[in-house]
Amino acid sequence: MRKIAVFLAEGYEEIEALTVVDICRRVGLEVDMVSVAGDKQVKGSHGISVQADTVLSRVNFAEYDMLVLPGGMPGTKNLEANEELMRQVDAFHAAGKYIAAICAAPSIFGHRGILKGRKACSYPGFESHLEGAEVTSGPVEVSGHVITSRGMGTAIDFALAIVKIFFGPEKSEELAKSVVYIK
């Protein structure tokens, strides 16, 4: 079974994180919500607290096929400040394993040199942080093993892109129809 980790830091954007968790679990993808703080309870940027499945110190990264970074402020800054998570993002990238980020979080990939020569998108105003990327205004960009998306309003597109990677376009389209997602 394929397995992904969605990382939660204080100030994460709730819809971006939970849409990925919900959509991916609907198709049977195993998803762990991982707190980068010492506590499983994590408060989002709009004051909504969510209980993560586990904490970063207990994660075996070898079990995961993808790492997902939601945006939000100060969530994005808190993710980027976590040295262990950044080591793992770099390791996944070096190994060609999937990494995904939405909203402000693609800036993390830009700062780490991951976007050089790739198409990428982000929340408006963060484009200058997508260092080396061909910046687009599309809802989602899949460039090799790197997935980026623009924000809360593109969270379903982002989650469906992840489903498409693991289950193919037919399953992604089927799920979109089942949740009455209309483009």
Image: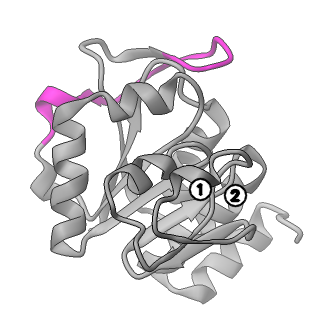
Magenta residues (range): 43-59
- Viewed as shown, does residue 29 lie left or right of 155? left
Q: Residue at x 10, y 57 (%)?
A: 62
For numbered disc 1, what is the local secondary structure? Answer: helix
- Relative to 92, is 52 above or below? above
For numbered disc 2, what is the local secondary structure? Answer: helix
Q: Quadrant of the N terminus?
A: bottom left
Residue 165 is situated, as x and y percent measured from the top left of the image, at 46, 78
Comparing 121 with 97, the one in front is 121
Residue 133 is situated, as x and y percent measured from the top left of the image, at 51, 70
Comparing 151 with 80, the one in front is 80
Question: What residue is pinned by disc 2?
Answer: 156
Q: Quadrant of the C terminus?
A: bottom right
- Relative to 87, is 183 above or below? below
Q: Residue furthest right?
A: 182
Question: What residue is pinned by disc 1?
Answer: 23
CB-based contact (under 8 Å), mark 1 and mark 2: yes
- Viewed as shown, does residue 92 lie left or right of 121? left
Residue type at numbered disc 1: Ile
